[in-house]
Amino acid sequence: MIGWTLQQWQAAYRSGDLSPVQAMKHLATALHDSERALWIHLLDESSLIAQAEALTDPSLPLYGIPFAVKDNIDVAGMPTTAACPAFAYTPEEDATVVRLLREAGAIVVGKTNLDQFATGLVGTRSPYGEAPNPFNPDYLSGGSSSGSAVAVSSGLVPFALGTDTAGSGRVPAAFTNTVGLKPTRGAVSTKGVVPACRTLDCVSVFALDVNDALSIYDIIGQFDTDDDYCRAAPSLQSHGLPARPKLGIPKDLPWFGDSHAKALWERNLAAMSEIAELVPLDTMVLQDAAALLYQGPWVAERFTVTESLLQEQPDALLPVIRDILEPAASITAADSFRAQYQLATLKRQSEQLMAQVDALLLPTTPGIYTRAAVNEDPITLNSQLGTWTNFVNLLDMCALALPGGFREDGLPGGITLIGSAWQDHALAEFGQRWQHHLPWQAGATGQMLALPTAKAANDDTADTITVAVVGAHLSGMPLNSQLTERDAVLLEATHTAPCYQLYALANTVPPKPGLIRNEKGPGDSIPIELWQMPVAHFGSFVGLIPAPLGIGSLETVDGRWVKGFICEPWAIDDATDITGLGGWRNYIARLNKESSVPC
């Protein structure tokens, strides 16, 4: 069970070889033997078994699957401390996200350690100890969601909840070789979450791979009328990036002396350039926005949570936390408005930046430090870790932190995809492509993960439709933009059933094919691509299709039926049969070769 993904847990239960009660008995031992500093409250075997025995519906999507919760998120009957014993209270009900997961069949195993009041990116600011990095305990595990990230990386649970205001759901992912999904602000309810900055806070997900992180997001990403800052998702969202997306990368990156981090970034860029176009950008606007988070009035939001403690029991807070929060008492309302005006300007500039690319690609952090170094200089080094994370929530972006391999010193490093609000699924789709391109192991377990399963063309929903293209709409061809402009996503390259003929139609610009089904032969299996498009855009796409072409039903080589380009039979009278060339790309290559031959 150690290092299992959601799919492996589900398969074990479906096979009948394992029951939730048996699983919790085995898991209780592993949890008891785990690093104590991961946990602030860990449930015993009887409590785990009681949750398992209460499950009655094996069809639930998370039936019997264990998960951990950062201890600034309420779990009914368990203390919430935010890593401050004097602040502790015991809630009577679950936070909305915990309730949704339990309703889906998941089992809470415990509350994880964190930087006090979620104020830090280091994982060393807790009276409950420092969760060590599972690859080298002398180094940071990252914060503030340190315990959740390490619990997943160690294989104890397949996923865990964290929070992310300035990078707390992404920095620990980079340091533990896990996935950190930081959703669009307001996409996931924060009801029952101890605020850090209430207007910016997000509940994040740690998982071993992208599929699992996205699966959990789809369960918890529900509109909550009881959370004033929760936002209803738009009816139409992008579910993927283009086949070869443009990813913006910074022209200049500070590494603060960490040559291993720089070398790993350069290796990741080389690998990423094989599946994406990398576009160097001036990203100073992002750094200007990041500076507002701790140098501006948003520190006052953190102060509101701890104000009474600072006044009545100042020693209840760690000195480094007091040093960060106490200056907020002097921030004025005028300061807040000035900062809001500045942020509005920066947000407009960031939108112009994002308009140039499909998403941003950044190193998750500019490096990693030892725990000893951070304890000697806690403010400066913590600030440096947030170089590429602090601005995301302020600018209303979403982010996906991904494993990026290992440095020469054996420590993991991460990359992060950043998109505009509500691009969560689009980033995850490309994250799955990255996992295919550069597979990674399951956290610190040493076990290689199975590659993500490509979405099948018949997995359409009420909001999407799959379209087969055979010619000028293929990836890299002149009309492919008609798909990508409508948020269509490439699912797979495949072939038709072996009963089609392909023609080059006469007098078409750009050249267009005609696909004819011929049951009696001759016929062949023609290369095609399957693209999934939002139904809302399908009508405008069909409206661009000129006669004699149209959309009908097309059979794939493995027997699926999808919508696809077909041609009226009368148009082949003066067309050229190119079936024997092996597809439209080969025909275009022949045309280009012929046109380059000198007369």
Image: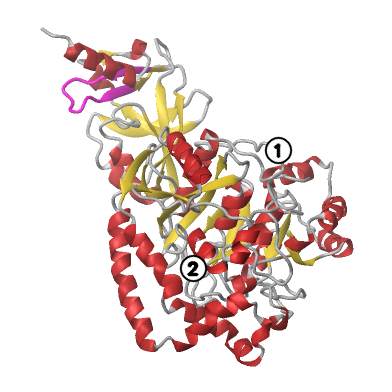
The percent position of residue 199, horizontal first and vertical second, equals 47, 75
Q: Of label 2 and label 1, which has the lower sequence position?
A: 2
Magenta-drawn segment: 501-515
Kindly tell me whether residue 466 is visible in this rendering. Answer: yes
- In the rendered image, residue 503 lying in the magenta stretch gets the answer yes
* Mark 2 secondary-structure assignment: loop
Q: Give the number of the mark in front: 2 or 1.
A: 1
Mark 2 Cα-neighbour bin, 10 Å: few <14, some 14–19, many ≥20: many
**Which corner quadrant of the image does residue 538 belong to?**
top left
Q: Which amino acid does label 1 sit on?
A: Gln
Q: Which of 560 and 271 is in front in this view?
A: 271
Looking at the image, residue 525 sits to the left or right of residue 337; the answer is right
The residue shown at (48%, 31%) is 561
The percent position of residue 270, horizontal first and vertical second, equals 43, 34
Looking at the image, residue 450 sits to the left or right of residue 326; the answer is right
Kindly tell me whether residue 62 is visible in this rendering. Answer: no
Q: What residue type is labelled 2?
A: Gly
- In the rendered image, residue 502 lying in the magenta stretch gets the answer yes
Looking at the image, residue 46 sits to the left or right of residue 178; the answer is right
Q: Are marks 2 and 1 in contact (CB under 8 Å)?
A: no
The residue shown at (64%, 59%) is 371
What residue is disc 1 on?
447
What residue is disc 2 on?
186
The quadrant the C terminus occupies is top left
